[in-house]
Image (cartoon, grey):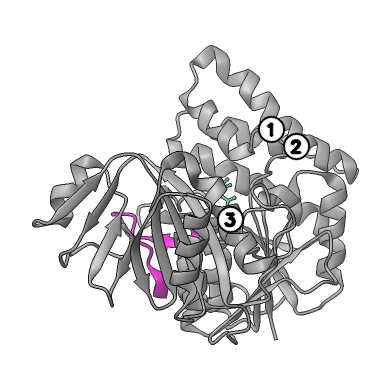
């Protein structure tokens, strides 16, 4: 039995967290394969290593060194915590970036995390560029990738950097931001893992953003479909595209916190029991909202949501992309607030939600009521108020 354990940037930002992670790995011999992100924020307002590397690439020549010193210091601090000399690894990485393209430079955070993790833990280093393969158009070659991984990890323990791979010409290709989740899911699928653990600083999905509602309810169990909806709609715990590889193999995803490893997190399973009526409330301000009452050829990834049942589609698109997706029938709305509610399909949720908003005099328009999903348009400046209102109506 194999468990793939992915560790996010926020839990790699301090030596004491690395210590917790090593303990977590050592406590279960099934945890044979680890995936690590680049070091994330150490405190509120701090920059992530990936952001620093983006600035590094864009900076003028005379500014690059200062930015690099910041990156280097993060890794030196971790190495120092474990009494490891990472000087040459860090310097060689710096040298290797000279003249390289954006993707190569930006991927070095994950590269350094995995190299250092391998030095500290003794787990064998797996080079993502050798195993995660894309075609020259940056499309992931899933079957080839899974075969290469399967062949590489037959026995032993391994660590790999997330977020990148390479195309058939050897050029580094990045996933979207947050893409280490996808790497972890690919590894889990390739080795037919029993569980894909996603370790972070929060133990699972909460019904809404804890920055908007204090101590929101945690969701114990979600289906893959529900997770897809929530991730697409902005619940930033797991990358939406990481669902596909694990769903294909029906691998359970367990979202857990390294700070409370003994507590259960959120489990993602093929069919979640409909215990909670509301699974998630997300809200965001959008610059331009396009709604069409007509069938479109929009791909679901471009659409915020296509409501198959009620036959219309809500999209967030750039003005220039409009033509590509629609023939006609676009109702374009400028700045708006969008509230999305994923729920277990209970009919009266829409009615109750609109009632709660009206009671607080929050202007709203129901855009979509599609089985397990409600989309509601509100004024851009009432997003947080609307989330609080809906949450307290259903949970307090
Ligand atoms: N380091 C990348 C990011 O900050 C990828 C990841 O963390 O998953 O987006």
**CB within 8 Å, label 2 to label 1:** yes
| Residue at figure coordinates x 32%, y 50% from the top left | 316
| Residue at figure coordinates x 62%, y 19% from the top left | 65
Position in image of residue 268 (x %, y %): 60, 77
On the question of residue 51 being in view, the answer is: yes
Q: Which residues are magenta?
A: 129-144
- Quadrant in which the N terminus is drawn: bottom right
Position in image of residue 210 (x %, y %): 68, 52
| Residue at figure coordinates x 58%, y 39% from the top left | 50
Vertical placement of residue 66 versus 31, above or below: above
**In the displayed image of the protein, which residue is found farthest to the left?**
327
**CB within 8 Å, label 2 to label 3:** no
Residue 127 in which image quadrant? bottom right
Residue 63 in which image quadrant? top right
10 and 370: which one is in front? 370
**Which label's residue is closer to the chain start, 2 or 3?**
2
Q: CA distance from mark 1 to mark 3?
A: 31 Å
The circle on residue 43 is 2
Q: Which residue is mark 1?
A: 46
Which class describes the residues within 10 Å of circle 2: few (<14), some (14-19), or many (20+)?
few
Q: Which residue is mark 3?
A: 389
On the question of residue 132 being in view, the answer is: no
């Amino acid at each position: 039995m194999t468990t793939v354990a992915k560790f996010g940037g926020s839990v790699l930002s301090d030596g004491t967290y690395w210590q917790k992670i090593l303990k977590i790995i050592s406590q279960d011999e099934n945890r044979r394969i680890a995936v690590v992100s680049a070091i994330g924020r150490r405190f509120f307002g701090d920059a992530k290593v990936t952001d620093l590397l983006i600035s590094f690439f864009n900076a003028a020549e005379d500014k690059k060194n200062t930015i690099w010193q910041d990156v280097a210091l993060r890794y030196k601090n971790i190495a120092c915590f474990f009494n490891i000399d990472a000087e040459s690894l860090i310097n060689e990485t710096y040298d290797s970036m000279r003249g390289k393209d954006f993707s190569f430079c930006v991927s070095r955070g994950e590269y350094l995390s995995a190299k250092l993790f391998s030095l500290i833990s003794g787990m064998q280093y797996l080079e993502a560029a050798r195993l995660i393969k894309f075609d020259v158009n940056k499309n992931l070659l899933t079957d080839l990738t899974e075969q290469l991984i399967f062949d590489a990890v037959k026995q032993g323990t391994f660590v790999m950097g997330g977020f990148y791979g390479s195309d058939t010409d050897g050029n580094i290709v990045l996933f979207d931001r947050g893409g280490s989740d996808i790497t972890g899911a690919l590894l889990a699928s390739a080795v037919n893992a029993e569980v894909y653990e996603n370790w972070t600083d929060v133990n699972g999905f909460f019904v809404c953003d804890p920055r908007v509602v204090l101590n929101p309810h945690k969701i114990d169990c979600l289906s893959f479909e529900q997770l897809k909806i929530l991730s697409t709609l902005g619940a930033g715990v797991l990358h939406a595209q990481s669902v596909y590889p694990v769903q294909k193999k029906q691998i359970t995803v367990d979202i857990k916190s390294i700070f409370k490893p003994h507590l259960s997190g959120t489990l993602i399973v093929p069919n979640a029991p409909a215990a909670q009526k509301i699974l998630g409330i997300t809200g965001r301000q959008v610059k331009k909202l396009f709604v069409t009452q007509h069938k479109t050829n929009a791909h679901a990834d471009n659409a915020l949501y296509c409501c198959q049942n009620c036959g219309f589609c809500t999209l967030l698109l750039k003005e220039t992309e409009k033509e590509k997706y629609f023939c006609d029938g676009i109702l374009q709305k400028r700045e708006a607030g969008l509230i999305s509610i994923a729920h277990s399909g209970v009919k009266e949720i829409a009615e109750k939600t609109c009632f709660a908003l009206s009671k607080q005099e929050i202007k709203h328009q129901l855009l979509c009521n599609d089985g397990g999903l409600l989309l509601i348009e509100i004024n851009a400046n009432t997003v947080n108020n609307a989330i609080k209102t809906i949450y307290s109506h259903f949970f307090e």
